[in-house]
Amino acid sequence: MIANYHTHSRWCGHAVGEIEDYIRTALSEGFEELAVTEHVPHRGDPDNHRMPWADFLPFNKALNKAIEEYGDRISLLKGFECEYMPERMDDYRMFREEYGYGIMILGHHIVGPDHSIFMFARNKPDYAVRLYADEVCEGLETGFFDFLAHPELLLMHYAPGFDKESERSLRQIYACCEKLNIPIEINGAGYVSGRPYPSAEALEMSKEYDLTYIINMDAHDPELLTKPYYSQVEAFASGLGIDPVPRYFADRH
Ligand SMILES: [Zn+2]
Ligand SMILES: [Zn+2]
């Protein structure tokens, strides 16, 4: 593995390690490119899954400092992992245009017209699977997002598992990614912790579409950027006959 485009840090409140710890690990593993992509802050702080809005400026300063310090040894990119929420797109655009957050990942963790359903909630309704697909596709249609994180997040705590309903939603998402030429992620954090994503069944089915795949560790701990972890995910992908792009963003940003 030579690049990772999905990296968190202690700033989001549920990851460990400073930004520099992830960069140093990436360097010692011989990575050529690393994107730091925290959960995007939301004005008004409606939930605690991300850094408080007021932390953005100090976070940005710390990230710029790290880029200054290490940027000559590894290509370091700024980005955010974002839920698609139409009313927040102006803030997302501000991060991109005014602060240089060039990689915007769609990581759609919250669904529903009032953003009340958390995809990780054990008791979420089964129809969240359909909402998720509709909202993901609507978000991708904006053209704002660079790739889709963990497409199979809809399987999280969805008791029926890979059934007709989740298959339909996943097909909807894959067709949309194919049409818009948006890469999908094979999520390392999910794989190493035994979550329902990435899903071998779903990925097998995804091969019916013309898709680009990126392996990302979704690191919430610098350890995840080390070989014992990422080599498992690489083996998983190659076992499915999937050939992910090694360095997707080179020369793009
Ligand atoms: Zn996270
Ligand atoms: Zn993430």
Image (cartoon, rainbow, N blue to C red):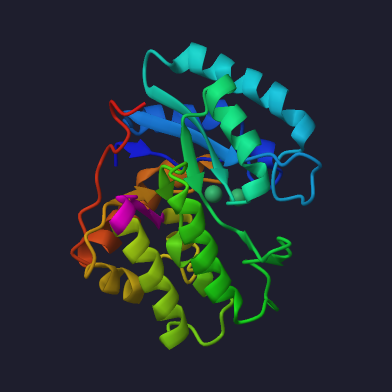
- Identified at 79% across, 30% down, the residue is 54
Q: Which percent across, then down, holds residue 253?
A: 37, 26
User: Which quadrant, please, contains the N terminus?
Assistant: top left
- Identified at 49% across, 39% down, the residue is 104
- Identified at 65% across, 35% down, the residue is 91
Say if 22 sits above or below 186 in the image.
Answer: above
Quadrant position of residue 242: bottom left
Say if 61 sits above or below 15 in the image.
Answer: above
One can see residue 199 in this view: no
**Badge count:** 0
Q: Which percent across, then down, holds residue 42?
A: 72, 42
Say if 54 sits above or below 211 in the image.
Answer: above
Say if 128 sits above or below 144 in the image.
Answer: below
Q: Which percent across, then down, holds residue 246?
A: 25, 41
- Identified at 71% across, 22% down, the residue is 58
One can see residue 215 in this view: yes
Is 169 one of the magenta-colored residues? no
Determine whether, in the image, residue 53 is placed left or right of residue 164: right
Q: What segment carries the magenta color?
A: 179-187
Quadrant position of residue 185: bottom left
Is 184 one of the magenta-colored residues? yes
State the residue in front, 218 or 93: 93
Q: Which percent across, then down, holds residue 220?
A: 56, 46
